[in-house]
Image (cartoon, rainbow, N blue to C red):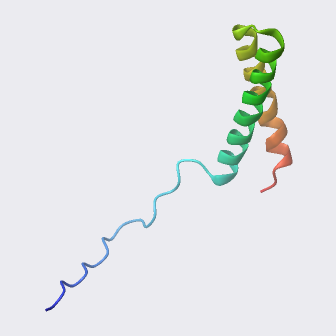
Amino acid sequence: MTTAPTPPPVPGTGDPKPFLPVRTAIVLQTAAFAGTIAGALTYLSTGNTAGAVLGGLACLGASVPALNGLIGD
């Protein structure tokens, strides 16, 4: 029994670039985690959902530039 030969690779530019670089993904993921924690703690302390969402978003926005400076290339 024989197997079919593998087709030759398709000519092109090679591997496509990733949607986000790894560094950017790590910064955004860590900032989102910090914002989630801050929002949850705000909700637990005040019981106000709108305030918790605003607190979480404020933490997310403040931590992106801070993490961008902390995480090296």
Question: Could you tell me which quadrant the C terminus lies in?
Answer: bottom right
Note whether 6 is above or below 59 in the view shown. Answer: below
Closer to the camera in the image, 6 or 18: 6
Q: Residue at x 15, y 91 (%)?
A: 2
Q: Is residue 43 left or right of residue 24?
A: right
Closer to the camera in the image, 34 or 6: 34
Quadrant in the rendering for residue 69: top right
Residue that protrudes farthest toward the left in the picture: 1
Q: Position of residue 31 (x, y in %)?
A: 74, 36
Count of all numbered marks drawn on residues in the image: 0
Note whether 3 is above or below 39 in the view shown. Answer: below
Residue that protrudes farthest toward the bottom in the picture: 1
Q: Is residue 68 left or right of residue 32?
A: right
Q: Position of residue 43 (x, y in %)?
A: 76, 15
Note whether 43 is above or below 15 in the view shown. Answer: above
Question: Could you tell me which quadrant the N terminus lies in?
Answer: bottom left
Quadrant in the rendering for residue 41: top right
Q: Position of residue 70 (x, y in %)?
A: 86, 47
Q: Residue at x 32, y 75 (%)?
A: 9
